[in-house]
Image (cartoon, rainbow, N blue to C red):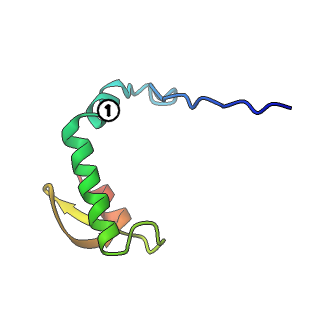
Amino acid sequence: MAKTKSKKKKRVNNKSTGRDYTYDLKYQKSPERVKYRSELRAYNRKHGTDGNGDGKDASHRNGVISGFEAQSKNRARK
């Protein structure tokens, strides 16, 4: 029996809300966003909180990385 690679489909819209994710996909691919995400990941890795399950994230209020806080509060802030 041969293994087949399954291709993961990109979510383009949400059927329940009708929200179109095309803009979001393009925005998250932009060089500025990629660089910002990599800086956050590097900060988390440097301080030992990346992937250890402690529920903490690098706080990034107003685009400035400073300290740590709960993931739920950090990601919910608008």
Circle 1: is it few (<14), some (14-19), or many (20+) Cα within 10 Å? Answer: few
The residue where tag 1 is placed is 24
Residue 20 x/y as whole percent: 38, 25
Q: Which residue lies furthest to the front in this view?
A: 2
Residue 61 drawn at (x, y percent): 17, 60
Seen in the picture, residue 75 relative to 66 is either above or below; the reply is above
Left or right: where 51 falls relative to 58: right
The one of 63 and 7 positioned closer to us in this rendering: 7
Q: Residue at x 13, y 56 (%)?
A: 62
Which quarter of the picture shows residue 69?
bottom left
Q: Where is residue 12 in the image (x, y as percent from the top left)?
A: 44, 25
> Residue at 36% across / 65% down in the picture?
71
Left or right, residue 5 beside residue 55: right
Tell me the quarter of the picture where residue 65 sits.
Answer: bottom left
Vertical side of 44 occupied by 30: above or below: above
The image quarter in which residue 51 lies? bottom left
Looking at the picture, which amino acid does disc 1 mark?
Asp
